[in-house]
Image: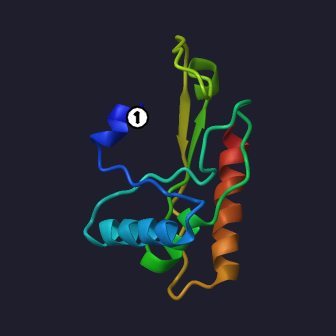
Amino acid sequence: MGWILAYSPFVSVKREDPRSAMGSIDHLIDCLGSGLSVIIFPEGTRSPDGKLGTFKRGAFMVASRSGVPIVPVAVAGSTDLMPARSFKFRPGTVNVSFGNPISRPLPIGKAEEKSMMEEVYNFISSEL
């Protein structure tokens, strides 16, 4: 997957470097402002057991600063096909569910950000 990401407009977030992480968030906001769509995995990584993990705040900061709605997407079954930290692919079925767009009027404060995060989390967990 690494070489595929290297040739895509992938934006990495270095969580251990807060200044770099904020730069990545600013870059994503610029991308959204120019009309591009962005996919963000709010857990930050794939879970080894396929269970939904804790969300990081970054995706919701992007939404709150850009005013762009979040469309929650649940991906179920991918852990069975390509386990985390493995290069083995297995045949099978993956189910992808799309939720309704979630947005809040600007300006969005931390309480609204948290509310969006909970709404996205609840949708995804209900689809897994």
Q: Residue at x 63, y 20 (%)?
A: 80
Q: Residue at x 43, y 65 (%)?
A: 24
Residue extending furthest toward the front: 17
Tag 1 secondary structure: helix
As rendered, which of 106 and 89 lies closer to the eye? 89
Colouring scheme applied when the structure was drawn: rainbow
Please determine whether, in this image, residue 74 is positioned above or below residue 113. above
Is residue 107 in sight in this rendering?
Answer: yes
Is residue 77 in sight in this rendering?
Answer: no
Q: Amino acid at mark 1?
A: Gly
Give the x, y percent position of residue 28.
Answer: 39, 65
Give the x, y percent position of residue 107.
Answer: 52, 88
Q: Is residue 9 left or right of residue 119?
A: left
Q: Is residue 112 left or right of residue 26?
A: right
Local crowd size for mark 1, using a 10 Å CA cut-off: few (<14), some (14–19), many (≥20): few
Q: Is residue 11 left or right of residue 114?
A: left
Please determine whether, in this image, residue 71 is positioned above or below residue 80. below
Q: Residue at x 55, y 25 (%)?
A: 94
Q: Residue at x 31, y 73 (%)?
A: 33
As rendered, which of 7 and 38 lies closer to the eye? 7
Location of mark 1 (residue): 2
Give the x, y percent position of residue 22.
Answer: 49, 72
Q: Quadrant of the C terminus?
A: top right
Residue extending furthest toward the bottom: 107
Give the x, y percent position of residue 86.
Answer: 58, 21
